[in-house]
Image (spheres, grey):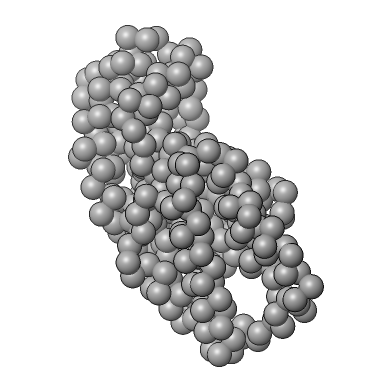
């Protein structure tokens, strides 16, 4: 990817005149330009030691290009989903670093903040783990505030800022309403398994599934549990739970996604990908 970035930077003195994106002709030029760059990325990525892209739906690039032409004023909505400990949050944190570096117009939202408030249930059973052991299905669509998530994402897509809930990950199961202000920026990334549950998926222009080797996923999951001071016995119980839940709720989402990416790819390589996209989208002269 570095070689692609350098090639783009070498052409800075040969920048194209910026088309008028308020016209259909200008948007069609932009769509054609981005198609060519995306195809170049995919060809380059195949040669990488651990490629980012595992699978891209054949019609994705042309379909997304048509979306840019036909609905230029709507925000670009991107969902990133996958199993627990597949690397979704880590990848999004890497994106955040790039956003900060390049001042990119991207807002990132964790769909996990839309978990239902289960604080009373946790008080009743004594702990989150005890509640799970009683059969509470944590990862099911019914465990999320999907109606609110859909309302908030629709507002963001149409240019309205929103205040989203905040789910506390301290074991209390508390959800604080209207806690986090999120801005309707040009690109909105929603990370979490709920991002493609039910009709939430229809809001997104790009749906991405993070895939990972099962043994590595288990190692990452247990390491994360240890960092959170979770008892090893309960951590293994929860690992068994998410395996069952993933088959029911998460793995079928692969079929809903446009792109499947590799959670094992190097984070520096992801950063290079973001930098390349920033470079090519800022290659027009004023």
Above/below status of 214 relative to 187: above
Above/below status of 267 relative to 124: below
Say which quarter of the image contains residue 160.
bottom right
- Report whether residue 169 is seen: yes
- Report whether residue 74 is seen: no
Above/below status of 137 relative to 30: above
* Residue displayed at 56% across by 61% down: 187
* Residue displayed at 41% across by 43% down: 262
Query: Residue 177, position in %: x, y?
Result: 51, 42
Q: How many marks?
A: 0
Q: Is residue 72 left or right of residue 17?
A: left
Q: Quadrant of the C terminus?
A: bottom right
Say which quarter of the image contains residue 172.
top left
Q: For this rendering, which residue is in front, 228 or 26? A: 26
Query: Residue 142, position in %: x, y?
Result: 27, 42
Q: Is residue 46 left or right of residue 282?
A: left
Q: Is residue 139 left or right of residue 49?
A: left
Query: Residue 16, position in %: x, y?
Result: 70, 80
* Residue displayed at 25% across by 22% down: 240
Q: For this rendering, which residue is in front, 273 or 237? A: 273
* Residue displayed at 33% across by 25% down: 215
Q: For this rendering, which residue is in front, 195 or 163? A: 195
């Amino acid at each position: 990817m570095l070689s692609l970035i350098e090639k783009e930077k070498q052409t800075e003195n040969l920048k194209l005149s910026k088309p008028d994106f308020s016209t259909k002709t200008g948007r069609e030029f932009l769509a054609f330009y981005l198609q060519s760059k995306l195809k170049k990325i995919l060809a380059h990525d195949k040669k990488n030691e651990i490629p980012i892209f595992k699978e891209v739906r054949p019609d994705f690039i042309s379909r997304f290009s048509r979306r840019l032409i036909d609905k230029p004023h709507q925000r670009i909505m991107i969902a990133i989903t996958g199993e627990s400990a597949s690397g979704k949050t880590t990848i999004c944190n890497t994106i955040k670093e790039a956003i900060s570096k390049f001042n990119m117009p991207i807002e990132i939202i964790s769909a996990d903040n839309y978990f239902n408030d289960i604080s009373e249930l946790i008080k009743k059973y004594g702990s989150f783990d005890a509640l799970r052991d009683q059969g509470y299905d944590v990862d099911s669509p019914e465990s999320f505030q999907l109606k609110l998530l859909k309302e908030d994402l629709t507002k963001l897509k149409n240019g309205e800022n929103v205040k989203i809930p905040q789910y506390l990950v301290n074991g209390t199961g508390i959800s604080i309403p209207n806690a986090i202000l999120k801005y309707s920026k040009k690109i909105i990334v929603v990370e979490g398994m709920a991002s493609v549950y039910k009709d939430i998926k229809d809001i997104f222009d790009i749906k991405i599934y993070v895939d990972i080797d099962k043994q590595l996923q288990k190692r990452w999951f247990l390491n994360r549990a240890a960092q959170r001071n979770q008892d090893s016995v309960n951590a293994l119980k929860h690992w068994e739970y998410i395996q069952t839940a993933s088959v029911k709720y998460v793995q079928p989402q692969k079929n809903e996604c446009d792109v499947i990416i590799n959670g094992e790819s190097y984070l520096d390589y992801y950063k290079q990908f973001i930098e390349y996209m920033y470079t090519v989208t800022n290659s027009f002269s004023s």
